[in-house]
Amino acid sequence: MGCFLTNSSLGRKLVMSISGCFLVLFLLFHMAMNVVALISAEGYNMICGFLGANWYALVGTAVLALGVLVHFVYAFILTWQNRKARGNVRYAVTVTEKGVDWASKNMLVLGIIVLLGLLLHLTHFWSKMMLVELMGQHTNDLGLAPTDGAALIQYTFSKWYNVVLYLVWFAALWFHLNHGVWSMFQTAGFANATWLPRLKCIAKLISSLIFLGFAAVVVVFYVRSLCGCCGGCC
Amino acid sequence: MAFKLDSKIPAGELAQKWSNHKAAIKVVSPANKRKLDIIVVGTGLGGASAAASLSELGYNVKIFCIQDSPRRAHSIAAQGGINAAKNYQNDNDSVYRLFYDTIKGGDYRAREANVYRLAEVSNLIIDQCVAQGVPFAREYGGLLANRSFGGAQVSRTFYARGQTGQQLLLGAYAALNKEIATGHVTSYNRHEMLDIVVENGEARGIIARNLVTGEIERHGAHAVVIATGGYGNVFFLSTNAMASNGSAAFQCYRKGAGFANPCFTQIHPTCIPVHGTQQSKLTLMSESLRNDGRIWVPKKLEDVEALRKGTLKPSQIAEEDRDYYLERRYPAFGNLVPRDVASRAAKERCDAGYGVNETGLAVFLDFKTAIAVHGKEVIEKRYGNLFDMYKEITDVNPYEEPMQIFPAVHYTMGGIWVDYNLMTTIPGLYAIGEANFSDHGANRLGASALMQGLADGYFVLPYTIGDYLSKKIQAPKVATDTPAFDEAEKAVKAKIEKLLSINGARSVDDIHRQLGLIMWDNVGMARTKESLEKAIVEIAALRKEFWKNVKVVGTADSFNVELEKALRLADFLELGELMARDALNREESCGGHFRSEHQTEEGEALRHDDEFAYAAVWEYKGMDEAPELTKEDLTYEFTHRAQRNYKD
Amino acid sequence: MNFTLKIWRQRDAHSKGEFKEYKVTDISSDTSFLEMLDILNNDLVHKGEEPVAFDHDCREGICGMCSLHINGHAHGPSQAVTTCQIYMRQFADGATITIEPWRSAAFPVIRDLVVNRNAYDQILQAGGYVSVRTNSVPDGNAIPIPQADAEESMDAAACVGCGACAATCKNGSAMLFVAARVSSLAKLPQGRVEGARRAKAMVAKMDELGFGNCTNTGACQAECPKGISIAHIARLNREFLAAKLAD
């Protein structure tokens, strides 16, 4: 059974579907966690502490990393195979077919943008939080405590270029999920004529929810950083 | 030397003939079947079903088709349905009634025994196809649905939307695929049979051209089955597929197989009218449309004028000004009269000046009444895809304005003569489906072509071929390095060389189009002694021109469509003349063959049973020689031959 | 009407192909696309040039023989029709029309616009059938089938095997074709018997022949001349995964 996940096209797609599903669940969780930062810095930091250098958080991080890696590696394998299947001679004229989402044909590009964003994000946050803790230090290079996530957010999103980069990243994620979420159901065989449109609708809802949740934090913290008068109290 | 025809019709009561025959003929043991090779040319309903069934029995089968896949055969285009005497509707249908309708529909020019067998096995076909996964239409209770069809007063037609032929062919093709997977069937796609090889009077194999590489190949076998369909494309414009041709059958004829009733051509009443001179083929609108559509032309000539000028829309013509001529002339069957009757009635109206389009060659098929009675939704469910297709082609919406239809060449009842075993006059050479002449007489009923193809392939040939092959169990593999194969291959190559070397001024299509016009004008829906004699002269002249002035570009050793077409046209140019000669010989009207000199006072076909109750079997004597006629007398022991009556 | 045609010409599978330009003039708007090519070919023959090879046969949209990638669309600009059902009135007078063969590694070009679609036959030979022998079957009405199931089966069975799905798919995937057959038989009780075997065998053959992986773009559905839905692909996925998980 193990082999059909690697040697069959439908098996490989199932791996993409399951790893993708796992990442979507993580994003939903992360987004929910971020929204807490809007409401209460203490609450947010409490969650950060809860997810510090604990064994369960580490296992979670490792699994997550594995999920990203699998999703990423499979994406490249599939794309390589697909290009081979397409042949060497390409059409001179191509169009986007009616009813075909742009995103569905550009998942790899979107995925790469998402991944670059992730790397940026890891240098911004993970390297200054969990990594610092793992290395046994008590302050990061910004002089902040690794458990003070809220302060880190405040710092990062006071820079306009970070805001722009993050919004681009979230937009790419939105497109990627727009297709990815219903696609994972389809690949796992959960769709039919009735549910196909519903799943597409659900995918839009989930991707929009994730986009809005993440973007709200970025935008709100940037706006707060602009009005220094009230010290970010407004 | 005339043929000695032995139809091998078994003795006994009509209903017992087939059972008796099966009990009497020989079978081949499983071990011996493995040693025997069969070639099947053509992969439509007949060929595919035969090849699959023969392979299941254990024979080694080679199949040949000119398209890229067996699934493309033109059986796929049959729309309406397939008949069977299941009596699922409880409307008093029976094997006898299906037999009787078919014999009568064929205007008493088919063999009783063959037709009865066809009706008898029709029920098995439905069972077989259902088991293969053919998605026939179902009632709410989950049981099979039926519709009615021309020429019958019971509902016995099984259907899968408007794609019955496609679904049945995919069933047979699936059966074939199952056998290809076992290795007992070898499939030669994009291969065209160019000659049949006869050795010591028996069929021994074929010469085929690989259409991709141009290579000429030899294939030997203990028996050869021709399942290559009809020759309607002799008319250039027909409802046949572009590549449908009569060449395989014609090679058999040339090599000594009798060709029976070549003039029996079916003109289908419901085709989209010809629109211009650039047209390549005619599109059929399913006969099932006649279930709900009403056929009419205006009563007044001034309305006709206005229609042609475009100043009047057909929907604006009042009910009392419409002539529903089929309902008027044939009250009992109305719009559901057999095809030949409906076609001739349309011609009669158009000849009288009532044709409703610019060319004067069209009548209306109107759904106004049906939409009023059943509602648009019901009609859409029944015929939606056909309506869409019509709109796509003509740019007219048939929900609002009536369709225009006109008869077009559709099917050829004539074909290679076969005995009750489906064997031709050449031992070891069989012909099945539309390629043979056996079951439809002078006119085929709707939804019966699919029935015949599958009956021959699934349930007749697999039994009867054993009777011949049982004598071949000692015979070794057929060698293809014999003088007969050498000679056949040499002749084929010479013919190709000749065609490529003429380098004249006219393209194959130009000449084919001209042949089509000669055929349609003189050997079409109504034929006269004069028109037929004229056709024979004109076709002979055109044939001469072809061999002097055709231009075939390209090479012999490559993918060369022009060469393929030229080879087929060369045969059509002889076949057309044969059809005219047969029509000239048959001094009567029957079914699809209408001689204007022979009609009743009301303009119906007038048979002369005393003189022409026979199948006319022609023997080839040379390209420019008159063929020789042998008659197979048709005896009617179990039916009373009557003037066909669809009035009451 | 007049048109400029940019047509892919390629002598055989081993030669290099290129686009060539042709003009056709005085074309009636009621002429079908393939009739327009007939006219071009007739002109070419008269000029002594080799005509453009293209596949076609029934010209009624049912045999699946015709192909052609026209202005970027498989089977031309209209939805749910085959190339033979395209009419010149759908193009603007004076337009330039680019005509290419199916492009997919599994469909090598034979000549000009003709490709080899034998791979589809091979997939069906791997399991696209119900294993019943001739005459070894029950009465047609012995197994009642709900009307909706028969209809859904028919929706999928409408596939003409033209190859537009794989030719359109940016991944060169044949999933819609395979799904149509698997799904059509899966909806019927007589097809269920060997459903698991069929799904596994056909997918294995599809992979072996080098078709790509489906990424659910839905382009196949958009260009399918029979409008076959990708919901059938979901059923294929279901059939296949259930079969594999049961192994």
Image (cartoon, coloured by chain):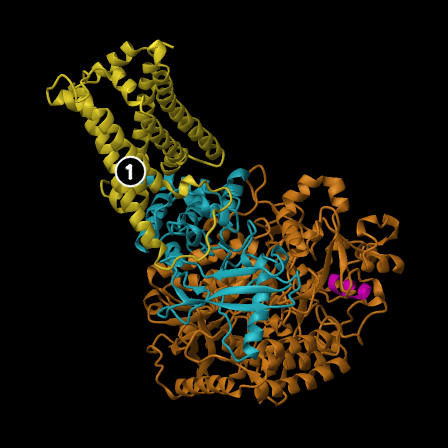
Chain colours: A yellow, B orange, C cyan
Q: Is residue C55 visible?
A: no
Q: Which one is in front, C12 or A175?
A: A175
Q: Is residue C245 left or right of residue C5?
A: left
> Residue lying furthest front in this view?
A229
Residue B346 drawn in magenta: yes
Residue B103 spot, x, y in % from top left: 67, 64
Residue B647 spot, x, y in % from top left: 80, 57
Q: Secondary structure at mark 1?
A: helix
Q: On the image, which quarter does residue B118 sit in? A: bottom right
Q: Is residue A175 left or right of residue C143?
A: left
Q: Is residue B126 left or right of residue B311?
A: left
Q: On the image, which quarter does residue B261 sit in? A: bottom right
Residue A168 spot, x, y in % from top left: 37, 32
Q: Is residue C190 left or right of residue A142?
A: right
Q: Is residue B264 visible?
A: yes
* Type of amino acid at the residue the image marks with label 1: Val
Residue B396 spot, x, y in % from top left: 71, 52
Q: On the image, which quarter does residue B467 sit in? A: bottom left
- What span is colored magenta in the figure? B342-350
Q: Which one is in front, B451 or C11?
A: C11
Is residue B614 placed above or below C118 in the rendered structure?
below
Q: Which residue, given by chain and number where applicable, does mark 1 sit on?
A: A15
Chain letter belonging to callout 1? A
Q: Which one is in front, B110 or A231?
A: A231
Residue C22 drawn in magenta: no
The C terminus of chain B - image quarter: bottom right
Overall secondary structure of the magenta section: helix
Q: Which one is in front, B28 or A104?
A: A104
Is residue A150 placed above or below B399 in the rendered structure?
above
